[in-house]
Image (tube, rainbow, N blue to C red):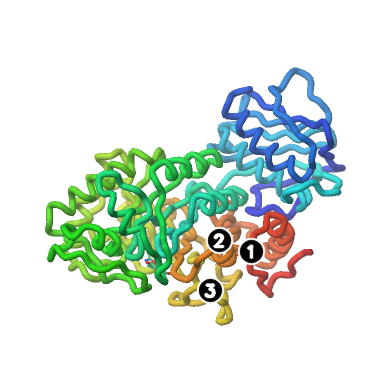
């Protein structure tokens, strides 16, 4: 019971065990289609390894021994959107929440309380027991995210769905997709089809690249939604735009399209900020992307505009802000955007300078992704075969032992919306590469985002993490077996 990640707010062990056995059902109340899907999600996690064929039924009057109960009836509003209460007795497993999202987070805790073999893909010989006890749990921060760079190397729908499932297991709730950069444009925009067709046709190292059709993107969004994860799309501008500039000559100040780019330098490209067509282009892109994105956020990048002068940059950001708002979205940008005059609801993402601190002092909300702690693409140590090291190496302890509200200096703590772990893919070509860099650092970031700061310590966390080795193995995750953790077998 002690090995849950992220660590729950409160946990009281009880006496005895609940045993999941053949014939068990998942009872839902109310019997809505949303809870039916949620129950099915849990059954789909339990059925392969147990072979039980667990079904979903609407909860009746008397409690059935051996069953699991998921309920939002008379849920406690104090649990908030994502909190839950889990009671395990030898007779039943009862999960209650105020909202379905809370049930979904609690379902992850049920998974983690079962033996690690529950994550296996085929029936295993195991006694499927859950220790008795009570858990009451809710997140510290509203924003617990990961970012995947699908531009430097392209990752298809199946790969992204797998990443979504792993985020869900650690109760994260945002996936930021870095959909465009110098090396590739990864989403079809019908008004400007060459962005994807030409701008998406390669990647770092010269491989074939790729892009999501709008149908594929919508499928990803829906898949994430079924895991109560919000997709945050990013189109980077005015820099990191070579793929777009290469696709349409008119976006360049000199009307000449540059060649596609497959290296890893940053900051050399810029949209032509003094041409009106640039803003028509952005208007079209934002319009289509906003229509495809049910989540409230749209990220416009804004980082490292080294080839745009400061006053042009400022005017540019101030012109983009109302475009995003006009399409009903809340704008997010990397912290460089704090040089511009921001409207109060623009969110600023910290990575490497003091822009977020300035924005927070002015009343804007910030997301914390400090490069030296939260960048999953930094090497673990000098011997890491993948990754970059411009922000230093980040071993597991460095990646775990920081507090998002302590990074901002004098800025108010309540400005911090939460945390996000970016994974830039300059050096990552396959899902195995992605997993190797994300695991096991990502669960640490998930815990920083979810768990209360009191009671968190590396020495205790690393024991819990050790117990996740067999779970990650059962899921087939290619994780880095860091030598500072005594991985359980
Ligand atoms: C920087 C840069 C990205 C790189 C990344 C590599 C930001 C916000 N912009 O982070 O283009 O891929 O570092 O670590």
Identify which residue is drawn at 83% across, 44% down. Answer: 129
Left/right of residue 280 with respect to residue 119 in the rendered view: left
Identify which residue is drawn at 63% across, 60% down. Answer: 456
Left/right of residue 382 with respect to residue 268 in the rendered view: right
Query: Which disc number belongs to residue 478?
Result: 1
In the foreground, 162 or 128: 162
Per the image, the residue denoted by label 2 is: 431
- Disc 1: residue Cβ within 8 A of ligand 1's nearest atom: no
SS at mark 3 in the image: loop
Image spot of residue 380 (x, y percent): 57, 74
Residue 207 appears in view: yes
Image spot of residue 419 (x, y percent): 48, 56
For marks 3 and 1, give the CA distance.
13 Å
SS at mark 1 in the image: loop
Q: Which label lies toward us, 2 or 3?
A: 2
Per the image, the residue denoted by label 3 is: 386
Identify which residue is drawn at 43% across, 45% down. Answer: 217
SS at mark 2 in the image: helix
Image spot of residue 446 (x, y percent): 57, 55
In the foreground, 255 or 368: 255
């Amino acid at each position: 019971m002690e090995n849950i990640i992220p660590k729950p707010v409160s946990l009281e062990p009880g006496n005895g065990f609940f045993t999941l056995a053949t014939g068990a059902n998942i009872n839902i109340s109310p019997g809505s289609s949303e809870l039916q899907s949620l129950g099915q999600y849990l059954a789909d996690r339990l059925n392969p390894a147990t072979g039980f064929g667990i079904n979903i039924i609407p909860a009746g009057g008397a409690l059935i021994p051996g069953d699991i109960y998921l309920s939002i009836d008379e849920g406690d509003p104090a649990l908030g959107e994502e909190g839950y209460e889990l009671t395990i007795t030898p007779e039943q497993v009862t999960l209650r929440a105020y909202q379905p999202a809370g049930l979904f987070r609690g379902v992850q805790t049920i998974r983690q309380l079962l033996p690690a073999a529950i994550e296996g893909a085929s029936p295993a010989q195991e006694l499927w027991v859950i220790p008795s006890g009570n858990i009451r749990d809710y997140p510290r921060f509203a924003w617990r995210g990961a970012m995947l760079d699908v531009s430097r190397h392209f990752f298809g729908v199946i790969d992204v769905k797998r990443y979504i499932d792993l985020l869900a297991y650690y109760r994260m709730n945002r996936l930021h997709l870095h959909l465009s950069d110098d090396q590739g444009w990864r989403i079809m925009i019908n008004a400007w089809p060459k962005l994807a067709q030409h701008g998406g046709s390669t990647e770092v190292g010269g491989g074939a690249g790729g892009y999501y059709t709008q149908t594929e993107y919508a499928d990803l969004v829906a898949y994430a939604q079924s895991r109560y994860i919000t997709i945050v799309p990013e189109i980077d501008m005015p820099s990191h735009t070579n793929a777009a500039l290469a696709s349409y000559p008119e976006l360049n100040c000199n009307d000449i399209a540059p060649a596609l780019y497959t290296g890893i330098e940053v900051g050399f490209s810029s949209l032509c900020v003094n041409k009106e067509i640039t803003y028509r282009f952005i208007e079209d892109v934002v319009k289509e992307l906003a229509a495809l994105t049910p989540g409230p956020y749209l990220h416009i990048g804004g980082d490292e505009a080294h080839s745009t002068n400061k006053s042009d940059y400022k005017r540019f950001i101030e012109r983009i802000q109302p475009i995003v708002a006009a399409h009903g979205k809340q704008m997010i940008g990397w912290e460089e955007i704090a040089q511009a005059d921001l409207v109060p609801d623009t969110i600023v993402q910290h990575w490497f300078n003091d822009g977020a601190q300035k924005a927070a002092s002015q009343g804007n909300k910030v997301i914390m992704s400090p490069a030296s702690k939260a960048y999953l693409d930094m090497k673990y140590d000098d011997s890491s075969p993948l990754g970059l090291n411009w922000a230093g190496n980040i071993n597991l302890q460095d990646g775990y032992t920081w507090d998002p509200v302590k990074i901002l200096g004098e800025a108010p703590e309540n400005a911090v919306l939460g945390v996000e772990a970016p994974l830039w893919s300059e050096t990552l070509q396959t899902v195995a590469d992605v997993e190797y860099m994300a695991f096991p650092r990502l669960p640490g970031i998930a815990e920083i985002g979810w768990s209360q700061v009191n009671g968190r310590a590396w020495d205790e966390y690393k024991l819990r993490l050790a117990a996740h080795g067999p779970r990650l193995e059962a899921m087939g995750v290619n994780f880095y077996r860091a030598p500072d953790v005594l991985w359980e077998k």
